[in-house]
Structure formats: C-alpha cells, structure tokens
Image: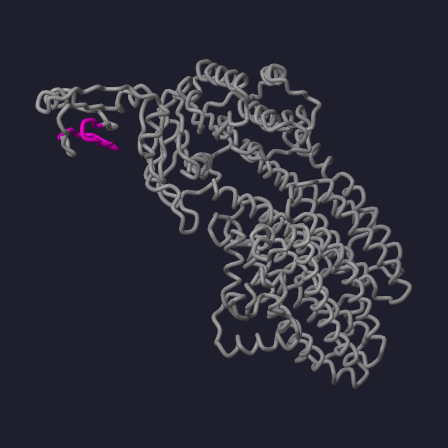
Amino acid sequence: MSAYIAILKRDMRLNGFAYLLLPFFIMIVLSTERQSGSLYANMTTIVLLPAVLGWLQAISLKAMTADSISLLSPNGRNAQLNYSILISITLLLVTHLLIGGAPDNALNVWLILSLSSVVMLISVCTAVPECSGWARLFQLLVLIWLSSDLMGLVYLADISELRSLMALPELARISIACMATIWSVLMFQLFRRTYLASRELNESRLPHSWLSRTNEKVNLWQSIGFASPHWLSALVQNWQRRCYLISPGNPLEQGLYNGHRSTNAMTVILICSSLVLLVMTLLSIPARAQGELNPEGWLIIVGMFFTLTAFILSFNLILEFISLQPTVAKLWLLDKSPDRKTYMARIGRSFCFRMLRFYVFFALVFIFVGIAVAGSFDGIRVYFMIIGFSAMILPFQIAMALYCAPRFKYRPLLINTLLLITVSIYVGALLLTKVIVPAGGLIAAPAILGSIGFAMAALQYDRWCNTALEVTD
Amino acid sequence: MNLIEMENVSKSYGKQNVLDNISLNLPQGHVMGLLGQNGAGKTTLLKLCLGLLKADSGNIQVMDAPAWELTPAIKEQLGYVAQKSDTLHWMGVRQLLDYTGAFYRKWDNTKVTALMHRWQLDPKSKVSDLSEGQKQRLAIIQAIGHNPKLLILDEPVASLDPVLRREFIRELIDINIENNTSVLFSTHILSDLERVASDIAILRQGHICCQGSLDDIKERYVRLHLRSNSPLPRELPVQGLLHVEYSAHHLRALAENPDMEVISALEKQLNATAHIEPLGLDDIFLELHK
C-alpha cells in the first residue's frame, strides 16, 4: 500500500491540477450544449477525455521510468500500471457523473472505452520500454480500434448529425467505410513505423540514423512498409514539387534530407486523405442531388478526416524538427551562419513556412471539397474555421517545439502548462465558434490531438537522447 | 554461490559490437571492480546484469534467475547507482528517499537518515538544486537504503571529492562486511578500486582481457627488465611476454606468469641481468591497453 500512496503523492504533485481541471472543463464544454448526446458532446467525451487521460498517464509513467532506481524497485512498474488504470477508471466515472449520465448509445460507449484503452495502451508502450513484449498486441488493438471506429462511424452513423449518412445508398456507405478503413490502416502503418518500433536499442532508433534513413530514396510505399515501382516514386516526387510541398533549397530540408528528398510519410497522408475525400465527395453527389443528405453532417465527416490529417501532419513535422536538433550544431558549422541562435531562427522559420505550405495546400483542397459537397459558402466557412483554428495552434506547437527540443528534460510544470494552454485554446475556440458556426466543437480536435502529438514527440525525443547517450558510453 | 553468472554474452548496437562473448562470475560476498576505457562496454555490461538491456546472445543469471526477467523478490535485493543520475529532480531529497523507500519492505529509514546527515544532504533541498556530487551521494543512499545483497554501481565516485570518496569506500566495505553484500562496480579511479575490490575484470574492445582476484592479477603481471652489455636478441624463449620494448642492450616487457627458471637460464645464456618489477593496478591497466 505504501507504494501506491507514494505514487499517488507523486502523481498529485505532477497532475493534480489537471485532474481537478479536467471534469470542470468538460462540464463547461457540455453546459454550452443544448442537446445532450450531440456530435459535439460526443466529440468532447470521445476525444478530449481519453486523450488527456492518456497524456497524464504517459507523464506519470515517464516519471517512473525517468528514475532507473524506481524502475528497478520491486513491483514498482506493476504498482504504477495498476495505479494508472485505477485513476483512469475513476476519472472516467467521475466525469460521467458530473456531466449527468452515461453516453446515450452503444456505439458511443464503444468509442469512449476503446479510445480510452488505446490511448492508455499507447501511453504505456511509449513510456515504459519494458512493455515492448506487448507492443504487437497494442499495435493489433490500435488497428482494430481504428478500423472498427471508422467503419462504425461511417457505416452505422447513428451519432446525431451523422445520421444524415443513412440517406446514402447501401453500396456508397460500404465503399466509404472501406475507404476509411484503408485510410486508417495506412495511418496505422505510419504510426507504427514511427512510434511503436521495438524497444531494443539499435542504430536505426538514433537521430542521425533516422535522418540518414530519410536521406535515402524513400518512396510512397516504402514509407508505409511496402516496396514500390520506380515510376510511382518519380510521379509522386514530381507532384510534390508542383504543389510546392518540397523545396530543396531551404535549410530545414537540406538538414533533414540533404536537399534531395524523395517522397516521405507526409505525402502518404496527403495522398491518402485526398483520395478518401475525393471518393467520399463523388459518392455523396447522388444523395445530395436528391436532397437526402444533410450538408452540415457531411461536412463534419469530412472535417474529421481533416482534423486527423492535420494532427498527423503537425505531429510528423514537429517530430522531424525535433529530430534535427542533435545535428543542429554540425549543420550550423556547415552553414557558416554567424551564430547558433541565428541558425536556429532560420531553421525555425523554414519549419514554419513548410507547415504553412501544407496548411495552405490543404485549405485549397478542402475549400473545393466544401463547395462541391455543400454547394454553398456555408461549407467554405466551416473549412475556413477549421483551417483558422489549426493555424491558431500552429505557433503554439512551434514555440513549444523550439523551446523544448534542444534541451528537453522532463518538466512537470511545463507539461502541465501545456495542458492548461491547450485547454484554454479549446475553451476560447469553443466560445468563438459557438457564436459563428454550430459545428464549432469539432475544430477543437486538432488542438487536443496536436498537443498529444507534441507530448509523445517530446517523450520520444527524450528516449532518443538517452539512447544516444547509452551508445556513446 | 555466484550472484551473477554471465556466459558467452554478446551485445551490439546496430553494427557496433559492444560486448563479444563475455563470461563473468561474481561470487557472493565479493567486490568486483570493472575497468575499461570509455566505450569499452562497462555500462552496457552492468545494464545487462540489471535487465535494463537485453543480451543478443548468451545467458545471464542474477541470483539464479534470468536477468531479463527479474522477479520483485530479486529486485528487492538489488541496488543500483547509474552513471548519470537521471532521477526525479523536481522532488525534495527527503521526498525522493521516501518515494524510493515505499517500494521496499526492508527500507532502513534510520540508516538512510544517518547517511543523509553524514553526507550533508539537506532533506528539504530540491534534487534539481543539488550539485553533481550531491546527486551522486543521494543516488548511493537510494541504492543502499534497503541493504541489498547485490550492489551494482556505475562509476559511483566519479563526481565525489576525495573526502567523500573515502567515506563512500568505507561505507561500501561496511556494507560488504555486515551483509555479505556482493558489489560489482565500474570506475576509473584505480586507487579506490585497490582499496576495496577483491576481484578485478578488465574490459577491452568488448572482451574481458583480464579477470581474477586483485592479488592474483598483481602477482600474475610483472614487468621484466633484461639488461646486457652485449646485444640482446629480439625473440626470447619466455612464455607470456606481452608488449615487448626492445633496445640493443635493454629489453622491457610486460610478462604474464613468467617462468623464473627460464629467466635465470636466460640470464646465464645471454650474460644479462634480469630484474622483475612488480606492477600497480594502474600500470597493469595501462600496459594491457597498449
């Protein structure tokens, strides 16, 4: 028992503020919602709650593994895992009591529970290297979850606004569900490649090797784990250049890819997301023509893909940026910039520009899709809000990456501040968008997901540094 | 009984082979010093013993259990001081010790408090505000607070001043005598090692090039000087000669268990004078790394 009390004390010092804030915040969000069980309410409980819980547990586990003595202590890890599970269940229950009831249907229960479990499992896998033996099981669970959730969302579609999907013909719904599943499998492959690699130390886990690996001609299919024909690689590279997605001259890409990068993971996301959106748009046309499709509900589905894509994009970019840090001194010497600070600023600027390029590109794609689907400027307005919001969190993400990356150490205060800022942005965005567009809650998702992305990238960076230290020893 | 048994253990990081076919035993009650240059694989070896890393091949048993699957009962008898203290630096000293102690059934709070005062650690100080030496002291207290049967220390005295180093060595000897604790530790400070270690293992390029009791090693390796007025031959029929430095009238070599009868015969044969110089641990270490 004394071990659990010690963990509780440590956890309260780390996360106590967040634990208090979380139910309170969810209450505020849900109190603004007139209709219980709406998409907005569901998104809040489905995305926010498990995401924050997962984040907190990752922090807590990280605290455990930061100290090799407590890592080696008898039953320490078991006690920590038991504790994490217990606190998560407690918070889930408390939150549901506070918001005044359970989710209104079986699908919601499944979404909330499955996402909670998956986020927690990923946190455990990220934070505790000893869980590597379970990594494959976790990966399988993530895959099942992604597929089943997306299929469930798209095919069953019985969450409030998404009911409009039921207007689509059977064949269309099945096709969309299949596309969503393929998309989720590709995303999962990407995620697995980056984050759920084996725990064992090896060269490929080191930053410099990670960089040198991207220096190779990694094409579309290789980046998700398959071999590909050369013509496809050339086609995609050409497409990237045309869309100004790569710019061999800029210092960031020179540092990362030696100036001649081929297709990378980012392109995979762009292509897959565009394909999914295109197919969804085409399939929706007959139903829309007959007036059976609610445009707003449809836009929300498309918006969900956007939020996930935006999350993975920012996640990946921040990760790339962070991975550049260990080599920054070497690059600085090669670059002959007057000082390291100036060089960092240049790198930071090119990072911002690259990020913005992606957002602009996506904005254009989504505006066209918005016009095609909604057939009115209302659709465009929703997309502008989504993009605007993503842009709003961008400086925050960049600032944090810049601040933390070169000298990241585990800092509970910093991480709790991040949580607070993210939550504040969420509330701010909520108040703003509730006035302008009713589907405002949806756009908060990138903030939450982006922040988890940042936290996980930070954890990963820390592990890379440790790995590098171990190898140099 | 051996508390650590390593048999043909290999470990590599990518293409870099760090440990190659290592075999090592640490008997109960022995204090073994692990020596080696930077990058020789000392930390890797210690982490393999603790199950913090997994060996590519070979077998590691710690208290008769596989090192990769240490049970809580075994962990309760282990103490570890990492080379670099990466502890929960936002806690206070007393808080951190209480936190660590909560995981052990036999945490000796009296001893911990006494050590904290003796080693001048303010219980209210934040760990992040401590100097490197103070952090090292704190890590040592964390490692020995539960009177472990096996203590693994990765350069524990690197950041300590001579006075505290001496204190620590005394504490280590006390622990060893009182609890019959086995200690495996790596260090670069050979004088400390000579004070406390009963056994030595020297790692070189992933191999253990020398292993045995300290006295045996000192007896085993000597420096042989051979002087003569007439030119000496380059090749001598003496077994165990290592690192021979040759000049026309003087031959200087590191010798492993030289046969004294052969040397006496050589003296007469070459009309030379042989002189056997006993070596200190640092000389042996340097000679073996030439």
Is the N terminus of chain A in the top left, top right, bottom left or bottom right quadrant? top right
Between B79 and A365, which is closer to the camera in this rendering? A365
Q: Provide residue A336's location: percent of width, then percent of height.
A: 60, 56
The number of numbered discs placed on residues in the rendered structure image is: 0
Relative placement, left or right, of A160 versus B289 is right
Give, as a single range, the part of the protein colored magenta: B237-251
Colour scheme of the rendered structure = one colour
- Regarding residue A181, the answer to whether it shows in the image is no
Q: Provide residue B116's location: percent of width, then percent of height.
A: 62, 18
Quarter of the rendering containing residue B193: top left
Q: Is residue A411 magenta?
A: no
Q: Is residue B244 magenta?
A: yes
Find the residue positioned furthest to the front: B229
- Regarding residue B186, the answer to whether it shows in the image is yes
Name the chief secondary structure element in magenta: strand
Between B155 and A180, which is closer to the camera in this rendering? B155
Relative placement, left or right, of A306 versus A134 is right
- Identify the residue at horizontal 78%, vertical 45% (top origin): A94
Q: Provide residue B96's location: percent of width, then percent of height.
A: 65, 28
Quarter of the rendering containing residue A151: bottom right
- Identify the residue at horizontal 64%, vertical 50% (top origin): A340
Q: Provide residue A406's location: percent of width, then percent of height.
A: 64, 47
Between A255 and B267, which is closer to the camera in this rendering? B267
Quarter of the rendering containing residue A277: bottom right
Find the residue positioned furthest to the right: A435
In this rendering, the answer to whether B17 lies above or below B253 is below
- Identify the residue at horizontal 14%, vertical 32% (top origin): B233
Relative placement, left or right, of A108 versus B110 is right
- Identify the residue at horizontal 40%, vertical 38% (top origin): B40
